[in-house]
Image (cartoon, helix red, strand yellow):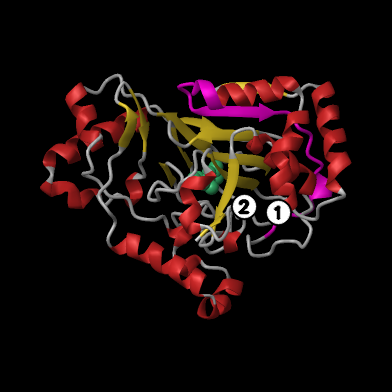
C-alpha cells in the first residue's frame, strides 16, 4: 500500500487553506465549492499533490493509498449519528469533508447516486441498529463481502475514498489487489468475455431508500425511473466481462456476493475460472484498520475492498467513516445527469 504521513507543517498549511475558504460554504455539496475544489486543491502541499497524482497516473499494483495523521477533534465532530438519514444541516465535520473533497479533486470528479443515501455525495459509513446482519456498509456483525464499488454499474467510480473520523472498535476494512500472474492466458481470455452478471448491491434498492425520498418518489419521475432502472438491472442483469483493459494487466469488475454464481453452472468453464480468481483474491486480502485522521483511496479498477464483522455499541462514539466516489470521466455519465455540472447519477 502507498502511504504518506502528514507532517506538522503540512497539517498547518492544510488548516490555513481550509480556514480561508470554509466560511464561504455551508456544505461540501455546494455546487460552487464542487466547481472550485479542483482549483483550490492546487494549493495543497506539493508532497501530497505529488503523492495523489502518482497514485492516479502510475496505478501502483497495491491499488490502495493512505494519507494519515490529520488531527480529528473528537469533541468538535460530536456524536456519531445513529443513521445516515440523521444528517446535520451543517456538518460538524465540514472542515474534514473539505479536505476530503480537495484530496479527491486531485484524482477526478466526485459523484453520487440518486438511489444511495438520499442522493448525497459524501456518505456516512456507520453501523446502524437493525442492519447488523445486512450485506450493507451499515452492518457490523456480518462480514461485508469484498467487492468493487458499484461493480454492477457502467458509471461506477474509478476510486472510492474513505475518511475515518472514529473507529474505536478497530473494525478492519479488507483490501486486496487483483493479481493475475497465476492465471493462464486462456483463463484471462475467459474473464475478458461477457459471460458473467452482477446485480446491484442492496444500498441502491428501494427498500433502503430514505424516508424523505419515499414521499418524493411518487412526485419525482426522475427518481422513480432511477429506482426502476436499478430494479431492472437487479432482475435482469446484462452479461458483462470481469476483466477489461490490458490483458497483461487487467482492470477488474467483480462483486461475488451479487454475481449469482450458482446460475453459472451452465457455463462450467466460466464458473471454474471465476472461482479461481475469487479464491486468489480471497488469499490476498489484508486488513486495514482505519484510524481517525486517515484518508484512504482505493483504485476501484485494480483492487477490491470489504469489511470484517465487528462488535459495536451505539453510544455516539462508535465507528464513523465518510465515504466518497470519484470518477476520472464525468462525461461518461452525462446521459444520466441533469446538467453537465450535476454530480448526481439518476
Ligand atoms: O466499512 C468499511 O470499511 C468498508 C465499507 C464499504 O465497503 C463501503 O462503504 O463501500
Ligand atoms: Fe464498498
Q: Residues within 10 Å of mark 1 (few under 14, many from 20)?
A: some
Q: Residue furthest front?
A: 340
> Residue 248, position in %: x, y?
31, 21
- Residue 289 seen by the camera: no
**Location of mark 2 (residue):** 341
Quadrant housing residue 30: bottom right
Badge 2 element: loop
Structural distance between the alpha carbons of marks 1 and 2: 8 Å
Q: Which residue is drawn at 45% across and 48% down?
A: 155
Taking the spot 79% from the left edge, 34% from the top edge, the residue there is 71
Q: Judge whether residue 67 is colored magenta.
A: yes
Q: Where is residue 276 in the image (x, y as percent from the top left)?
A: 24, 32
Labels 1 and 2 touching (C-beta < 8 A):
yes
Residue 229 visible, this orientation: yes
- Decide whether residue 226 is among the magenta residues: no
Nearer to us: label 1 or label 2: 2
Magenta segment, which residues? 56-81
Foreground of the two, 162 or 251: 251
Amino acid at each position: 500500500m502507498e502511504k504518506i504521513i502528514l507532517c506538522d507543517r503540512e497539517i498547518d498549511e492544510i488548516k490555513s487553506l481550509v480556514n480561508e475558504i470554509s466560511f464561504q460554504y455551508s456544505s461540501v455539496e455546494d455546487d460552487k465549492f464542487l466547481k472550485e475544489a479542483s482549483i483550490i486543491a492546487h494549493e495543497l502541499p506539493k508532497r501530497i499533490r505529488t503523492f495523489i497524482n502518482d497514485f492516479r497516473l502510475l496505478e501502483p499494483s497495491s491499488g490502495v493509498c493512505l494519507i494519515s495523521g490529520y488531527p480529528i477533534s473528537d469533541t468538535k465532530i460530536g456524536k456519531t449519528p445513529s443513521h445516515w438519514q440523521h444528517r446535520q444541516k451543517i456538518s460538524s465535520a465540514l472542515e474534514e469533508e473539505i479536505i476530503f473533497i480537495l484530496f479527491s479533486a486531485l484524482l477526478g470528479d466526485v459523484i453520487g447516486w440518486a438511489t444511495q443515501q438520499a442522493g448525497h455525495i459524501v456518505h456516512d459509513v456507520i453501523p446502524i441498529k437493525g442492519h447488523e446482519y445486512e450485506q450493507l456498509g451499515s452492518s457490523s456483525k456480518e462480514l461485508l463481502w469484498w467487492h468493487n464499488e458499484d461493480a454492477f454499474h457502467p458509471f461506477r467510480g474509478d476510486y472510492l475514498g474513505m475518511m475515518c473520523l472514529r473507529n474505536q472498535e478497530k473494525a478492519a476494512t479488507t483490501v486486496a489487489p487483483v493479481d493475475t500472474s497465476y492465471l493462464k492466458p486462456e483463463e484471462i481470455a475467459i474473464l475478458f468475455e461477457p459471460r458473467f452478471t452482477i446485480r446491484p448491491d442492496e444500498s441502491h434498492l428501494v427498500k433502503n431508500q430514505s424516508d424523505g425520498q419515499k414521499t418524493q418518489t411518487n412526485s419525482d419521475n426522475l427518481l422513480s425511473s432511477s429506482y426502476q432502472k436499478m430494479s431492472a438491472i437487479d432482475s435482469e442483469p446484462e452479461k458483462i466481462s470481469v476483466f477489461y483493459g490490458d490483458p497483461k494487466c487487467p482492470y477488474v469488475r467483480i462483486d461475488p456476493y451479487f454475481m449469482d454464481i450458482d446460475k453459472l453452472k451452465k457455463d462450467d468453464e466460466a464458473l471454474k475460472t471465476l472461482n479461481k480468481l475469487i479464491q486468489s483474491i480471497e488469499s490476498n486480502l489484508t486488513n486495514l484498520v482505519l484510524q481517525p485522521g486517515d484518508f484512504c483511496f482505493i483504485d476501484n479498477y485494480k483492487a477490491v475492498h470489504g469489511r470484517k464483522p465487528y462488535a459495536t455499541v451505539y453510544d455516539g462514539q462508535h465507528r464513523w467513516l465518510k465515504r466518497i466516489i470519484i470518477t476520472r470521466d464525468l462525461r461518461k455519465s452525462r446521459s444520466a445527469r441533469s446538467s453537465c455540472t450535476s454530480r448526481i447519477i439518476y
